[in-house]
Image (cartoon, helix red, strand yellow):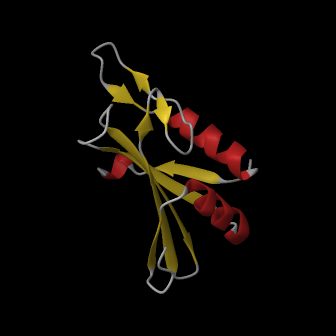
Amino acid sequence: MNESSRIVHVKEYEKFRKLAVELAPKSMLYTMQKAPLSAPRIALRLIFVSEDKQYIFLDFPAGKSLRQTRIPIKFNKHGEAYIDDEDVANSIREQLGRKDLEIHSMEVLGY
């Protein structure tokens, strides 16, 4: 984790979670993205901003859930993997102990 830059990539969810609790952002953003080397081929990117830094965490599959956040991975009728928006929001709020945390998908922005 390099904190001298304006973008901080955090590799461990526990560190990301602790930063989010400590820095108490008003909101968090997320996007689902393709992960061609994972099975299933999906990943979750979590982002929050505090002061002049952007904190980013990536989570990848481990079976039927994401490895570190434990958010479940679901499959549509065509067998394509997806992560439910409500599962993301509810899991993150619960894990951070922040019912008031605004959580927004960046999917509408085309990410």
Residue ID at (51%, 50%): 104
Residue 58, given in percent of the width and then of the height, sits at 43, 54
Against 25, residue 68 (above or below) is above
Residue 109, given in percent of the width and then of the height, sits at 33, 52
Q: Quadrant of residue 38?
A: top left
Residue 24, given in percent of the width and then of the height, sits at 70, 66
Residue furthest toward the bottom?
A: 4
Residue ID at (70%, 52%): 96
Residue ID at (44%, 33%): 83
> In this orientation, does residue 25 appear?
no
Task: From the viewer's perspective, tell me whether residue 51 is left or right of residue 96.
Answer: left
Residue furthest toward the top?
A: 77
In the image shown, does 94 or 63 lie closer to the viewer? 63
Residue 14, given in percent of the width and then of the height, sits at 62, 56
In the image shown, does 62 or 19 lie closer to the viewer? 62
> In this orientation, does residue 5 appear?
yes
Q: Quadrant of residue 48?
A: bottom right
Task: From the viewer's perspective, tell me whether residue 9 is left or right of residue 68.
Answer: left
